[in-house]
Each structure stands twice: as structure tokens, then as C-alpha cells.
Image (tube, rainbow, N blue to C red):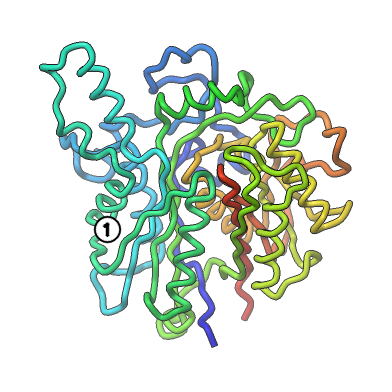
Amino acid sequence: MPQRVYITGIGMISSIGNDTGAALTSLIEEKSGIGEITLLDTVLKDKYPLAEVKLSNEELLEIIGNSGKTNFTRTALLGMVAAREALNASGIEIPGKYKTGLISATTVGGMDRSENFYKEFLADPSKGHLIDIVNHDCADSTERIADFLGITGFMTTISTACSSSANSIMLGAQLIKAGFLDRVVAGGTDSVTKFTLNGFNTLMILDKNGCRPFDENRAGLTLGEGAAYVVLESEELVKAGNKKVLAELKGYGNANDAYHQTASSPEGTGAYLAMNSALQLSGLNPGDIDYINVHGTGTQNNDLSEGVALQKIFGEKPPPFSSTKSYTGHTLGAAGALEAVISVLSINHGMLFPNLRFETPMKELGITPFTKVIMRADVQNILSNSFGFGGNNSTLIFSKMNG
């Protein structure tokens, strides 16, 4: 029988806090990280808000103990901070006798350094230094994080748009169940860049007032940045070490409806298939889910498509649901992992965190997100959605450890 997979450590950095403790405080206080652009050098600075990590690259370098070095991308730096927190929280020592891997997701990679290179190069080719773009590849951040953690046995990079880090967690669980690895640090990291901000502006799906997921008057998403990782361990390791378990990764599912390059199907086909697959693997019924952390980007298309799928799975009275992107912004490749960590926090603290800035129900749907922190003594099962461009839809289910 395949091993069960447990989460023994979590770590995150985002616009709502530089670690999980700070993020939890912001979540409880309903304090969003969305605000004016202060770090990104962009012509859109006064037009759109962002959810930036409130630390410069130099400050991030100081946190990881590499002050003075310059050959790290912002994506890698964010990943190092979050992955180290997760690893420390799990109590794992690297190296060790167990097979340990790193699965890291990103969409932006080292684009921040490439943008700076081309700006200088176009102005004066003699000032362009090729060394500034060797970090562009998505896998560069994974290698940097692995080196920083001391993980040498296995590493790989996932880049499936906005479902990337959910898929990294899913792959980690599959490798453990297959006996290929004993434990995995899985998650994702992405920094805000001019390319992504300009790209989503071109698609005309940015909200000038900050994202309002599932609101009738929603006008688009708000980009954010950050990183989050979970430590997955096999049932055998957890029992042998008598380790504290934060949650079980009970189920997961991935589906692609192949509807459109960027849009979700109006019928919510991909979202439905992913959620249904995760529920079947978990052995849970829709009625067993206590909370849904929806993908909830705030775009016209996504929220309607996901809402239709939710009603297909859960009926007209679904469990409480909300989009925590109203706190963190949409962190692209890091989003699934950030919301995984938030789900684990909900399970361990008995709290559900609301959908900020929601005012008016969507006329097409009969369901609405909740808007204030819900205090519950017992949160057993949480379903978390992450949907990416190209129809790559993923769902994770986290459950409380009982017994």
C-alpha cells in the first residue's frame, strides 16, 4: 500500500510577512499586502498596485547570510528564505541518511536580472555584461536553493504557470509514495518583474484598485511576489522519528480542459475535473470539506468559471470559501504553495481567513465568499485550488492529523 504523506514543516515570505508568524498575524488582522509600488522600477508605478515583499535584494541577502554577493536573482533569494524556514521548522538535518529532494516551481525565474541587463545593453552595448543574464533560466533558482539548503540527491523545477507550486507539492507526494524519495522540500518562488506586470497589463486584466475576487465589480488581478515551501515526509519517517505532523496531504488532482491559452472554460470543466480527482484520491466526500481556498484571481473569466465548478461539486451551499490572493496578490508560480501554507495554518490554528474587498455578489452565481475571519475549533479538511494558463488546473486537499 502506498505511503501516506505528511507535512512536517512550512515556510513562506510574501507581502503580508517575512515568515509564517508574521503572515499569520496579517491574516488574523485582515491586513492586506497590496499597496503602492515601492521597489519595482516601472512606468506603471502610479497606475497599478502590487503586493511586494517589503525587502530589497540587499536586505534579503543579509537575511540568508550572503551579504555582499550580487549573483542571485530576487526569485532565488525569496525561495532561499522560505525554504530554509520550512526546513528548520521540520527539524531535518541536511545531509542525512534519508533520500531528500527539492522540487521548486517558478514562472519568472531570473527575469529581473535580464531586464536590468537589456536596459543597460540597449543604452550602451559596452556596458552589458553577459554574467547578468546567466541566471535567467527557471532552474537557476532551484539550483541556488538546493545549494543553500545542502540538498544534493534530487532536484527539479516545475513551471506550469499559476499551478506550478501546487504541482511541485503533488509531484513530491508521488515520488514519496513511489519510494523514490523519503522526504521532499516542495513549493515555489516568484518575484515581480516589469515583464509580468506589462504582460498582464497588455491582457487588460489588472485591477487599479486591488483585486476583488468573486465581486460583481471585479476588474482583474493584482500581481504579488513571494515564496513558500512545505516539507513532505513519508509515513514511515514520521513514525520512526515520532515527528510532529502539521497536516496530511490527503489528496491531489490535475486536469487540463485544453479550452484556451489563457482563459478558463465557461463551464468550469478543468476546475471540476481537478477537484473531483482530488476528492476521489482522498476518499473524502464534498461534504467532508470544511473550507475551500479558491484560486480566485479577481478576473472576470476565472472567478465565474471557478464559481460554476464549485456549484457543480458542492451544490448551492458549498463550504466557506475565500481567495487569500486578496491578501497576497497573485504570486504566479508561488501561489499554490503560499495557499498550501495558509491552509496548513488554518488547520493548526482553527481559523479561516476571509475574502477581502468583497462587496457585491456576482449575478451569475448563487454563492459568495465570507468576508471576516472565522474562528472554528476544528478544521479537518481543506481544499485548495490553483489554476494556470493553458488549462493546467490543480487541486490539493490538506487534512488534520488525527491519532
Q: Quadrant of the rendered structure where residue 272 is?
A: bottom right
- For disc 1, the marked residue is 149
Residue 34 is left or right of residue 141, and the answer is right
Residue farthest bottom in this picture = 1
Q: Residue at x 44, y 40 (%)?
A: 226
Going by the picture, which residue comes out furthest to the left?
126
The image quadrant where one finds the N terminus is bottom right
State whether residue 270 is above or below residue 216: below
Quadrant of the image containing the C terminus: bottom right
Q: Is residue 348 visible?
A: no
Within 10 Å of disc 1 (Cα), the crowding (few <14, some 14-19, many 20+) is some
Name which residue lies at 42% across and 85% down: 240
Residue 17: give x, y in percent of width and height. 47, 39
Q: Is residue 340 left or right of residue 8?
A: right
Q: Disc 1 on helix, strand or loop?
A: helix
| Image mark count | 1
Where residue 84 appears, x then y in whole percent? 34, 54
Residue 250: x and y in percent read: 61, 70
Residue shown at the point (27%, 18%) measured from the top left: 119
**Mark 1: amino acid:** Leu
Q: Is residue 368 visible?
A: yes
8 lies left or right of 349? left
187 versus 90 height, above or below: above
Task: Give the vertical position of 182 relative to 268 (above or below).
Answer: below
Residue in view at x 38 percent, y 59 percent: 103
Q: Residue 334: x, y in percent?
A: 47, 46
